[in-house]
Amino acid sequence: DRAVRIAIDASKSLAHGSPSKLDVGRRVAAALGYMALAGSERAEVFVAGEGLSARSVLSRGRAGLPSFLRSLGAIEARGKTDLARAVDTLVERCGRPGMLVLVSDFFDEGPVIAALRRAAAAGHDVALVQVLAPDEIEPDFEGDLLLEDAETGATVDLTADAETIAAYVLRFTRVCAELRAFARRHGGTYVRVRTDEPTEGAVRRLVARSID
């Protein structure tokens, strides 16, 4: 009788992409929720923003699927995010450990890995779903740009030359490596999903408990 709790990052940066990262994340969450409920497990949706808020009641069985899907569909990308705080709050709210799925782009400078370690130490089976747009994986920007942070509105002038792109790729690679290392060390799952690819493959890798 396991509970599957899915926390979806709904910060404004998740509106990026076509389809958006949020849309793709919702599709993955819908598939996981369906499998959990069809298997007579319990499932619940949370929104990870600057804190944590519940979007659905803890449902069990196929009868809970319509409510679960409506809750997913009502999530909007807006504001900032604090994933570490959201994870810690979710762990505090849980009556007992279960499966904790975190869907995000993980572009969060906070102590996310430390919070995930605490969740694993509390007995949760942690699955990480990193949703990314193609230009975040393989940036193709060039020239002088004015970049705006989707969450804070802060702007910065940037010359997108080879050195700048290399620095971004290094930082991005480091984030992915940290998520991968966490999953390996704590028996978790880490799946990376591109917005321009079908989600079926990502769902299969989640079920197989893969580490991308």
Image: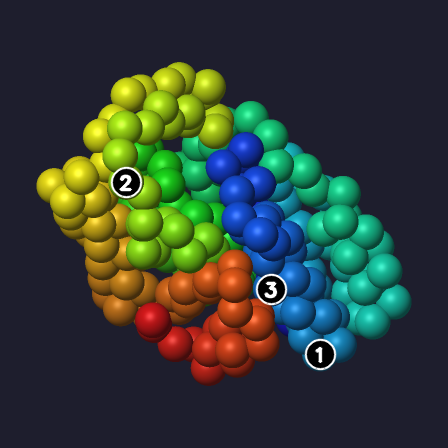
**Helix, strand or loop under label 3:** helix
* Residue 98 coordinates in the image, percent (x, y): 54, 62
* Residue 123 coordinates in the image, percent (x, y): 42, 59
* Residue that sits furthest to the left in the current view: 163
The CA span between labels 2 and 3 is 32 Å
Q: Residues within 10 Å of mark 3 (few under 14, many from 20)?
A: many
**Above or below: residue 14 compared with residue 26:** above
Residue shown at the point (46%, 63%) measured from the top left: 193
* Residue 205 coordinates in the image, percent (x, y): 46, 77
The residue identified by callout 3 is 28
The CA span between labels 3 and 1 is 17 Å
Q: Earlier in the sequence, mark 2 or mark 3?
A: 3
Q: Earlier in the sequence, mark 3 or mark 1?
A: 3
Kind of residue sitting beneath label 2: Glu
Camera-near label (2 vs 1) is 2
**Above or below: residue 202 compared with residue 157:** below
* Residue 48 left/right relative to 45: left
